[in-house]
Image: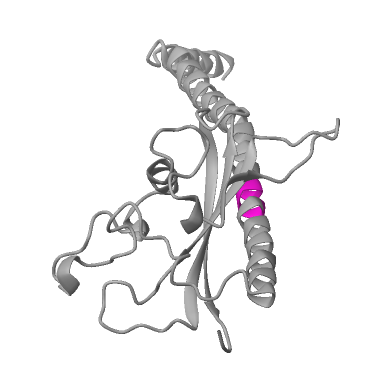
Amino acid sequence: MKISGIRTNMAISIKKNNQPSGSGLIAVILVLAFMLTVGVAVLTVTSSGPKVSASMRYQEEAFNAAEAGFDAARMVIEDSLASGTWGSFGDRYLTSPTGIDIPFINMNLNTPNPNYFRRLTDEQVLELLDQDRNGQADNPLQVVFFEEPFVYDRNGNLDLRYRYTVFLIDDEAGFNTTDPSDFLMVCIGVVRSGPNITDRILATCRLEVEIEMPEL
């Protein structure tokens, strides 16, 4: 009985030693590959997190700039109408460059106008309003505000990185109907990387608000 038990144990030991070699190394490699994949994913998320946060902050600041432009323009319009400085909006609508306020060419719905402001980016609109890039609107009478700074830094100076532009659009332009009692106010807020208008734009925001006046 004792010899039989020894033979049985020897047989079991020999069977274990016949397992394929290198299986442990493969398992280690798989674990390392998995850990490397997880590490790369965590590193990517960690590094992109600050960029996403900065982008969201810039976008919020651009929205605040556009909103500030709306509030400032509303007060200017109310004061101008009350004082009689503005008799009507006819001369205040943005019409230059030609076609910027016309949605369709020759009132044909099948031929959209590529120069219409709604088919342009905020940056393209600003460039068209100031084509020589001198910081002043080419047609100042047709722009309520252009690249207007409004935020003060810690030293009490205007922070030129934050600006707004506001202009009025005749919402019936390009069609045969006219209604001088209402218009579209367009406010564009901009956040730049530096104080110059040629500095890189980090974010923009456009607000389009339809204004209806009771009587002119």
Of residues 17 and 159, which is closer to you in this image? 159
Tell me where residue 146 appears, x and y as whole percent: 55, 48
Looking at the picture, the colour scheme in use is one colour
Tell me where residue 55 appears, x and y as whole percent: 58, 40
**Is residue 8 inside the magenta stretch?**
no
In the displayed structure, 139 sits above or below 136; it is below
In the displayed structure, 61 sits above or below 9; it is below
Extreme residue in the bottom direction:
214
What range of the chain is rendered magenta? 60-64
Of residues 24 and 206, which is closer to you in this image? 206
Quadrant in which the N terminus appears: top right
Q: Is residue 109 visible?
A: no
Left or right: residue 84 compared with residue 146: right
Label total for image: 0
Name the magenta segment's main secondary structure. Answer: helix
Of residues 170 and 103, which is closer to you in this image? 170
Left or right: residue 177 compared with residue 216: left
**Is residue 63 inside the magenta stretch?**
yes
Residue occupying image coordinates x 41% and y 84%: 179
Tell me where residue 107 appears, x and y as whole percent: 19, 73
Residue occupying image coordinates x 46% and y 22%: 30
In the displayed structure, 16 sits above or below 146; it is above
Dividing the picture into quadrants, the one containing residue 6 is top right
Tell me where residue 211 appears, x and y as whole percent: 54, 77
